[in-house]
Image (cartoon, rainbow, N blue to C red):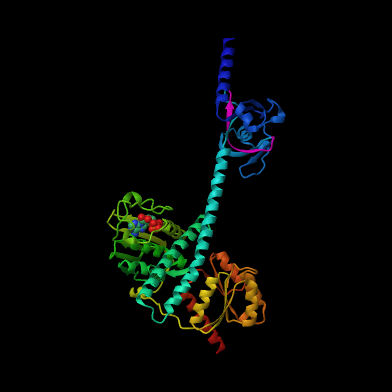
């Protein structure tokens, strides 16, 4: 009698304990019939199941789904599996649909229950309601997605006004003899546009990275090419601060499988940082060498250095060393968004490489070492490092092409119109797709510079229409657009474009392209 009372008391205590749990708890026997449940379980299920009733085996809820929404039969629930394989199944996410149709996400913890001989006699399941947490996570994910979309749109929209400003500045540069004041003002606008373009490009890249849309266009590239492109980008900043750049190339050419533009972006970003974070008149070393099967690129400066505690985190997004107690910004250098190194590391990793930062502390300079797997080693030619620095900045010769400019942004169209006229071409302008097709028909251009997002008919359709004409295949079609992803390039190729230029187009690069098109035209005519 005493024994029975003791057992009864212990059961009562056990049930009181389960009742107090901030989670749904229930037990079943060897056949899956529910033997006990607490009131929290009823709240989760939305009803009370019948005890020891075969109609309410296992979960007692009407419908059950896996976390990705696939319906689960009740004998597939974790409690059933526990009985089947006599094992614990803890922390599994499932969705319960209550009789009123409401769905809840819960974590299930199913465990075997044994008697005093160790024989399996049932199972206990604890359900933890994580619905609110899931909803908060979904909201966060949605907010993050909206933020990324906003960043991409913002960067894209900010780019548009840059094109006409760039063109206008180029036109002013073409003036016969601008006064020193005008030259000074133009140089400022030039520098600021370059800086703004860099910031906007970084923003776009970050939006691509977070949306997993950054793609590499790989080819065989050499260290020398990468250095040349990077130095061309960073030269104005380095010279602007009066730094000395010391370039050392490997004795033998080193090649990797990589995206030239992106690798140049990596090195240029490191060079720009070296320039920004070094007092005027400093020194920057850019070195390429072979170490085993790796190509190693090092950018070192004798600048303000990086505190040891910041070294592990400077590659994280939006991380900037707090220099509020020091001179900031250094040299009056243009500020950044704290995303340059994040981009750099991501790009290096996408190439199968690593990057490491080193500094002996404030005032002791910094060193960034990029290690990339090498592709092949070619020849024995000794390289002349001064070639890397030589800039090919000749103004392209004038062209005499018949050009149709199509852009719904009137400033963009007008500034391109003037730039192209001033460099010897005959130009017509259209502001929407239909007008463009009609004008192309009448004017018969050699070349069409075509924006993609146009009223009436988009640029792809305009290109297709032109290609359908008997004269349409002789026209060079150049897409001018803010979108430069692989998929955008493929789309314009499919629509019949010969070239795809991303805004803001560098006027000098555009004129060089026109030049090569004209030369090709003349060669085929001859
Ligand atoms: P930012 O746009 O701020 O330059 P980055 O991601 O390129 O962003 O760099 C992150 C931070 O790392 C910078 O704010 C700067 O404090 C530090 N840093 C980067 N390169 C150097 C360098 N060469 N010397 C000193 N500090 C550097």
Residue 248 is situated, as x and y percent measured from the top left of the image, at 32, 69
Q: Where is residue 87, by image quadrant?
A: top right
Above or below 172: residue 370:
above
Residue 208 is situated, as x and y percent measured from the top left of the image, at 51, 58
Residue 156 is situated, as x and y percent measured from the top left of the image, at 52, 62
Q: Where is residue 478, by image quadrant?
A: bottom right
Left or right? Give the position of 256 relative to 10: left
Predominant SS along the magenta part: strand
Is 390 inside the magenta-drawn segment? no
Residue closer to the observer: 174 or 366:
174
Q: Quadrant of ligand 1?
A: bottom left
Question: How many numbered callouts?
Answer: 0
Q: Is residue 416 visible?
A: yes
In the image, farthest residue toward the right: 55
In the image, farthest residue toward the top: 1
Q: Which residues are magenta?
A: 99-116
């Amino acid at each position: 009698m005493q024994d029975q009372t003791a057992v009864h008391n212990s059961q009562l205590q056990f049930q009181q304990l389960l009742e107090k749990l901030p989670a749904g708890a229930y037990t079943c026997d060897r056949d899956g019939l529910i033997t006990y449940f607490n009131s929290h379980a009823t709240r989760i299920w939305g009803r009370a199941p019948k005890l020891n009733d075969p109609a309410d085996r296992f979960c007692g809820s009407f419908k059950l789904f896996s976390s990705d929404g696939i319906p689960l039969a009740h004998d597939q629930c974790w409690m059933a599996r526990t009985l089947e394989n006599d094992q614990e199944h803890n922390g599994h996410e499932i969705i319960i649909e209550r009789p009123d149709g409401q769905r809840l996400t819960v974590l299930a913890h199913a465990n075997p229950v044994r008697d005093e001989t160790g024989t399996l006699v049932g199972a206990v399941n604890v359900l933890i309601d994580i619905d609110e947490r899931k909803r908060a996570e979904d909201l966060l994910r949605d907010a993050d997605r909206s933020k990324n979309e906003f960043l991409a749109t913002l960067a894209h929209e900010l780019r548009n006004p840059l094109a006409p400003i760039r063109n206008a500045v180029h036109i002013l540069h073409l003036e016969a003899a601008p006064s020193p004041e005008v030259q000074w003002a133009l140089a400022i606008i030039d520098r600021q546009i370059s800086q703004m373009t860099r910031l906007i490009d970084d923003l776009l890249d970050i939006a691509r990275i977070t949306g997993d849309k950054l793609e590499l266009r790989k080819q065989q590239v050499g260290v020398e090419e990468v250095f040349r492109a990077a130095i061309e980008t960073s030269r104005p900043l380095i010279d602007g601060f009066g730094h000395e750049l010391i370039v050392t190339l490997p004795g033998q050419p080193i090649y990797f499988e990589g995206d030239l533009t992106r690798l140049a972006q990596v090195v240029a970003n490191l060079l720009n940082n070296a320039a920004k974070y070094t007092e005027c008149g400093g020194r920057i070393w850019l070195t390429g060498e072979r170490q085993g099967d790796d190509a190693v690129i090092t950018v070192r400066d004798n600048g303000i250095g990086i505190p040891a505690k910041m070294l592990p985190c400077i590659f994280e997004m939006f991380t900037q060393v707090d220099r509020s107690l020091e001179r900031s910004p250094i040299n009056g250098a243009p500020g950044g968004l704290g995303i340059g190194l994040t981009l750099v590391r991501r790009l290096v990793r996408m190439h199968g490489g690593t990057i490491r930062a080193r500094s002996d502390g404030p005032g002791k300079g910094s060193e960034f070492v990029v290690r990339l797997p090498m592709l092949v080693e070619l020849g024995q030619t000794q390289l002349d490092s001064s070639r890397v620095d030589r800039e090919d900045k000749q103004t392209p010769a004038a062209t005499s092409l018949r050009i149709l400019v199509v852009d719904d942004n009137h400033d963009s169209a007008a500034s391109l119109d003037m730039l192209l006229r001033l460099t010897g071409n005959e130009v017509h302008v259209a502001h929407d797709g239909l007008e463009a097709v009609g004008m192309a028909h009448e004017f018969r251009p050699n070349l069409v510079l075509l924006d993609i997002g146009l009223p009436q008919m988009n640029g792809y359709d305009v290109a297709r229409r032109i290609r359908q004409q008997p004269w349409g295949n002789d026209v060079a079609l150049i897409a001018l657009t803010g979108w430069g992803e692989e998929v955008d390039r493929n789309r314009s190729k499919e629509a019949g474009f010969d070239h795809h230029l991303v805004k803001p187009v560098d006027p000098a690069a555009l004129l060089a392209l026109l030049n090569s098109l004209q030369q090709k035209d003349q060669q085929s005519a001859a």
